[in-house]
Image: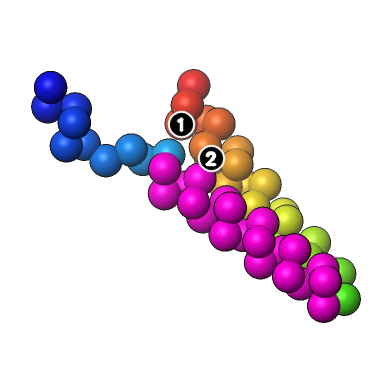
C-alpha cells in the first residue's frame, strides 16, 4: 500500500530517453548529422541505465 506514493525511478529516465530521441530526430531533419549521432548516443546511454535498473 505504501508503494503507491513512491516515485518510479525509471519513469523519469524513460521520459528523458523519449525527449532525446525527439531532439535527435529534429536534428536529423535539419541536416545536422553529427548532432543527431551525439543525441542518439546519449539516448542509448540512458536506455542502458533504464535496462540496468530494471534488472
Q: What secondary structure is found at the residue carrying circle 2?
A: helix
The image quadrant where one finds the N terminus is top left
Task: Check the image and name the residue furthest to the left.
Answer: 2
Cα separation, mark 1 vs mark 2, equals 6 Å
Residue pointed to by mark 2: 49
Residue pointed to by mark 1: 53
- The image quadrant that residue 19 belongs to is bottom right
Locate residue 31 relative to residue 43 in the image: left or right. Answer: right
Instruction: Tell me where the magenta segment starts and ends, as one range.
Output: 11-30
Q: What secondary structure is found at the residue carrying circle 1?
A: helix
- The x and y percentages for residue 2 are 12, 27
Give yes or no for residue 38 being in the magenta stretch: no
* Residue shown at the point (49%, 21%) measured from the top left: 55
Number of numbered markers: 2
The answer to whether residue 32 is seen in the rendering is: no
Numbered circle sitting on residue 23:
none
Locate residue 3 relative to residue 53 in the image: left or right. Answer: left
Amino acid at each position: 500500500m505504501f508503494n503507491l506514493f513512491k516515485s518510479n525511478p525509471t519513469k523519469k529516465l524513460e521520459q528523458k530517453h523519449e525527449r532525446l530521441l525527439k531532439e535527435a530526430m529534429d536534428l536529423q531533419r535539419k541536416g545536422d548529422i553529427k548532432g543527431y549521432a551525439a543525441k542518439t548516443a546519449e539516448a542509448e546511454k540512458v536506455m542502458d541505465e533504464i535496462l540496468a535498473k530494471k534488472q
